[in-house]
Amino acid sequence: MDEQEQLARNRPQITLSMIVCNEERRYLRQALETHRPWIDQAVIIDDGSTDGTAALCRELLDGIPLVLVENPVSRFSDEVRLRKQQWEETIATNPEWILNLDADEILTADFGELRDELLNGTEEAIYFRLFDMWNETAYREDAFWQAHAYYRPFLIKYRPSMSYEWKETPQHCGRFPLSIQHLPYACHVPRVKHYGWAREEDRVRKYVRYQTLDPEARYGWKEQYESILDAEPRLVPWTD
């Protein structure tokens, strides 16, 4: 075992937990290549992909322990069911830390520099800010798009003895169980670039999806849904 492998084995262990669906030509490659050096194993739910997403996961994570579960039909219309599946498959691997990211979310490089310092602290939940990128170089900021003004949990230390409960809604149920709000936490500098809105075709697809799955905006924000297709939203240049 060389020195680099020894250091990786001795550091706090991160399990990447992710849901993917038809990501082959989107941001999956960039996400996994970015996060690979920071993780020690991965649990991925392929939620009904009809492209080469699963094969790409195996290729990009070759050499890293990987649990890849392939749902024959998407479960996203009942998101809490899908998130529970992701959670159960992840904790079945007995993780130390769980990094929960979507396939179009990418942590900034400074996380790599701070990784072990953060995980060796006293906190059991690490919060970052998420920026909704509206193209490759700018994020949206207006009355309806302010995700980056708040910190939210992306990385938690798993407590096997803790009882975990969920927000039981079919949309916008959260990536983690509600119970993690009781963990000691801290807000940190690394940021998450969310590319889910960065292409016009993705915005149209998501608009149609929300109109179909949540037409009365029971689980979301009606005005925000309606603003998705704004022709000239206010954009702010991204700075590293």
Image (cartoon, grey):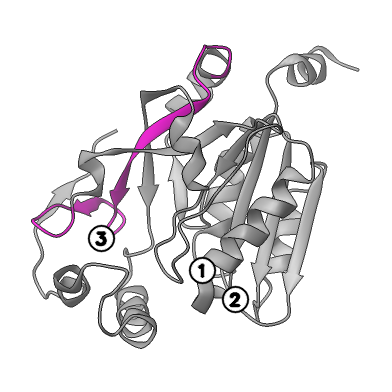
Asked which quadrant contains residue 191, the reply is top left
Residue 176 x/y as whole percent: 52, 48
Q: Residue at x 58, y 71 (%)?
A: 21
Residue closest to the eye, 74 or 220: 220
From this viewpoint, which residue is outermost toward the right? 1
Residue 166 x/y as whole percent: 51, 54
> Callout 2: helix, strand or loop?
loop
Q: Is residue 88 above or below residue 16?
A: below
> Does 215 sit left or right of 23 as displayed?
left
> Does 146 sit left or right of 89 as displayed?
left
Q: Which amino acid does the dot numbered 1 rest on? A: Glu
Q: Quadrant of the N terminus?
A: top right
Q: Which residue is mark 3?
A: 134
Q: Which amino acid does the dot numbered 2 rest on? A: Arg
What's drawn in magenta, residue-wise?
Answer: 119-145
Q: Nearer the viewer, mark 3 or mark 2?
A: 2
For marks 3 and 2, give the CA distance.
27 Å
For marks 1 and 2, give the CA distance.
7 Å
